[in-house]
Amino acid sequence: MKGKLLLVGLVVLSPYVVHAQVVINEIAWMGTVASASDEWMELYNNGSDAISLDGWKLESTSGTPSITLSGNIPAGGFFLLERTDDTSVPNIAADIIYTGPLSNMGEHLVLRDASGAVVDEVKASGGWPAGNNDTKNTMQRSGLSWVTKPATPKAPTPIVAVAVLPVKQVQVSDTKTLDMALPNSAPKEAAHAVSKPIQQAVTFLAQKDTLPLQPDQAPAPVPGRSGSGTLFEGQGIWLGLSVLVGAIAAVALVIARRARHL
């Protein structure tokens, strides 16, 4: 029995074993500001081992370009392909020079290893999903999708931080609004039982200059106006949402208990 379980475990886990992988990472199908002919492409090795590209091919299904690769790509490294000569990307040496233009209307590019197996492909024959011919920003891989960003030959795509924008503060003065929002059949004690948590959640979610809570930072209470609940500094929106969800759950529990006695 143990042997069967071990075999099943190997079968289930085997698709998740990580191997070195080379991907098409950046495409300057629009060329550069200097020349529309200065096209270039970049491969990236996201694996933990260097890979020999001898005998590999990067080609379009249209037939042009068709590039036979050679050389090595280091673990976590890049491989730069420049069209015609080594001036397409100034001050960065090409790993290989190729000929043949990329269509501005799109291409279906296929990367094959020495055995002919498909390693990666970009299905863009109907149009490039990213890149800008006016600004010359290139088409760059970002996870499972593509983004338009300033060229980064032989360098990682920059990560943009997301900021939390401040919004206007909302004051909840009493429980009248909450009472009116409940059905007539709902007991009044339900409103009073959760009015303060809801006031805190609504006031907190709308407070100005909201910042994420640091792991070692405890919430500092700040007295609010009379009847408006309490504001918390340094807490993120998710905490406010959790308070609001908990308050709604409390309403449902009080209503359910009252219904059993009807």
Image (tube, helix red, strand yellow):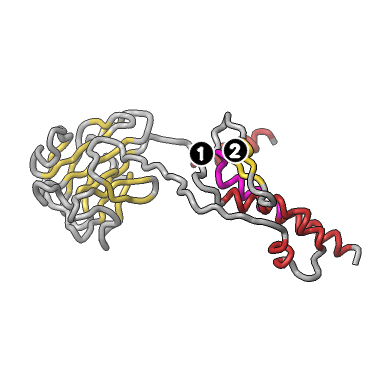
Q: Across the whole image, how many numbered discs are drawn on residues?
A: 2
Residue sitting at 33 percent across and 31 percent down? Answer: 76
Residue sitting at 64 percent across and 56 percent down? Answer: 172
Crowding around mark 1 (Cα neighbors within 10 Å: few <14, some 14 to 19, many 20+) is: few
Viewer-nearest residue: 192 or 82: 192
Q: Quadrant of the C terminus?
A: bottom right
Viewer-nearest residue: 17 or 11: 17
Place of residue 181 in the rendered image (x, y in percent of width and height, measured from the top left): 70, 66
Residue sitting at 32 percent across and 42 percent down? Answer: 23
Which residue corresponds to mark 2? 9
Q: Separation of disc 1 and disc 2 at Cα? A: 8 Å
Mark 1 residue type: Ser
Q: Is residue 22 left or right of residue 167?
A: left
Decide: is 8 above or below 109: above
Q: Main secondary structure of the magenta part?
A: helix
Which residue corresponds to mark 1? 14
Q: Quadrant of the N terminus?
A: top right
* In the image, farthest residue toward the right: 261
Q: Is residue 197 left or right of residue 81?
A: right
Viewer-nearest residue: 174 or 77: 174
Mark 2 residue type: Gly
Can residue 118 be seen here? no
Specify start and end residues of the magenta stretch as a single range. 233-247
Place of residue 237 in the rendered image (x, y in percent of width and height, measured from the top left): 56, 47
Location of residue 43 (image quadrant): top left
